[in-house]
Amino acid sequence: MAEQKSPWRFHGGLHLDHHKAESNTTPVRAIPLPPRLTLPMQQHIGQPAEPVVRVGDTVDKGQTIAHAVDYVSATIHAPTSGRVVEIAKQAVPHPSGLQDLCIVIEPDGEERWTELPEPWPDYTAIEDADLRERIRWAGIVGLGGAAFPTAVKVNTSGRRAIDTLVINAAECEPYITCDDRLMREQAPDVIDGIAILMHLVGARECLIGIEDNKPEAADALRAEIARREAREIRVVVVPSVYPSGGEKQLIKLLTGKEVPSQGIPSAIGIVCQNVATAVAVADAILRGRPLIDRVVTVTGRGVAKPGNFRVPIGTPAAFVIEQAGGYSDEIFQLILGGPMMGFSLHDDRVPVTKAGNCLLAASREEAPGIDDERPCIRCGQCVTVCPVQLLPQQLFWYAQAHDFDKVQDYHLFDCIECGCCAHVCPAHIPLVHYYRYAKTEIWAQERERYKSDLARRRHEARLARTARLEAERKARLRQKKEALEKKPAGASKDPKKAAIEAAMKRVAAKKAAQQASRENTGTETASEAKD
């Protein structure tokens, strides 16, 4: 199959050192179970899951331990069999080192599976709603880092028709190679997942976007496509310009189309999914298996033996590092994610989540943003490299000033947080940190508004319910009064009162009869005496 290259380009971007060879030369390795697994209820975009187990419960591998409680949410499953030893707030992967509600499982080592739903090899005979429900049950989210619930993303009902499924296999950030190894080793599973997703969204073609620094992965996919004669699926090679793996940037590279500002790809007839997500979908539909582990890249000069590992969700980062030979003498900073979009971990005991694709044990030279921040010099380099064509310096000033209305006027939420602006900033301003802070504050304000609106609606509903009940009570009284007024005079008495009155009349009549009898007897006696 001839190589197809993208003829389009996106604005800005950076040519970065790849650092892929450090971790992509060896196969994915499975790791043993850690002493404890810590599973946060918030591993995804949307509402946190709600625990359905209690401390002391025994759980089986693959068992649901927390349910999705809203449409945009994700179910969580036990990665192994064991016992629930704690349900409480624990440290989780977060730039600010925050804690969140977690379920802690102590593995029993038995790897005892729960009863799984039946596989659906003939998925085309299954209703679309049932396929989406299976994906939702499996707890699948975007595994490229965004962690948006997949069942929501593939629900195209009520939207325009989907023409193209885009599979994001670019893996554009330096150091990260988990998707590269996945494609090389599980190409049939990738194509299975793609076929299911195409059927589900109704796409007539699929474009797999992959950077030109992954020739082995591209060849593995092409070979599998050729074996199946799946001409509707094509591998398209894109240049290694960061961030080619951004959703909107990849769509531009593959189709030449622009996703509208603050819009989503389905608005232009496209659905985009990560390549690892496609494999998870194949596992759920064809094998009835939930998402309980993922491939994680462990790399950087700060770790002894870089590579890719299949890690149970909830495994502590420190335990994963141990499986890669432990820290080297050059360790300076442990980063979750890559050097551009990742963030430093405050504690290496935090768990790997569904969104965690890389642990970068960075040396001082590899660590980003270690220089002191200085005032902006208005050089404009950030504008030149921004792939979304924003004005990063304006966003910075308004975010710094807490002017959250103005920062939205400059399209803050179009920012993909790729870090290009911060990378080229001569003043070493951590621009993305300011953007994330502004987004977090705006979301917090929106949540408060939502809570306030919800409380107001509940209060109004209570007042309306009270008024309705009062109106119904008055209506019943009015109807009763009208009914009484319509009755004949003799029928107006209460039956009980009438019965009492009748009884009293009978008693009075009886007394009167007795009195009359005595009087008659007395008269007769007097007459006899006279005689």
Image: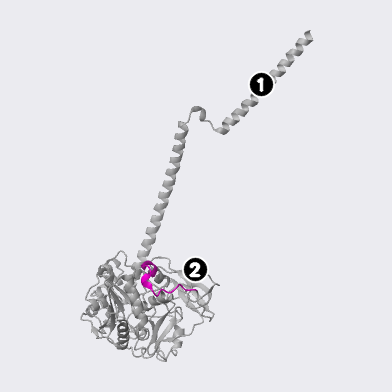
Q: Please state which of residues 426 and 231 is positioned toward the viewer in this rendering.
A: 231
Task: Please identify the quadrant where the N terminus is shown.
Answer: bottom left
Quarter of the image for the C terminus: give it.
top right
Task: For mark 2, give the secondary structure.
Answer: loop
- Residue 408 position (above or below residue 18): above
Query: How many labels, in total?
Result: 2
Quickly name the residue at label 1. Answer: 512
- Marking on residue 75: none
Crowd class of label 2 (few under 14; some 14 to 19; many from 20; radius 10 Å): few
What is the quadrant of residue 524 in the picture?
top right
Tag 1 near tag 2, CB within 8 Å: no
Graded by Cα atoms within 10 Å as few (under 14), some (14 to 19) or many (20 or more), the crowding at tag 1 reads few
Say what amino acid the circle numbered 2 marks: Val
Q: Position of residue 388 (x, y in %)?
A: 25, 75
Classify residue 333 as left or right of residue 57. Answer: left
* Residue 503 visible in the shown view: yes
The quarter of the picture where residue 180 lies is bottom left
Q: Which residue is mark 2?
A: 52
Quarter where residue 92 is shown: bottom left
In the depicted view, which residue is nearer to us: 7 or 87? 7
Whether residue 16 appears in magenta in the rendering, the answer is: no
Instruction: Give the extent of the magenta segment.
Output: 115-131
Residue 64: image x %, image y %? 47, 71
Q: Is residue 443 left or right of residue 118?
A: left
- As measured in the structure, the alpha-carbon distance from the residue carrying label 1 to the one carrying label 2 is 80 Å
The reply to whether residue 342 is visible in this rendering is: no
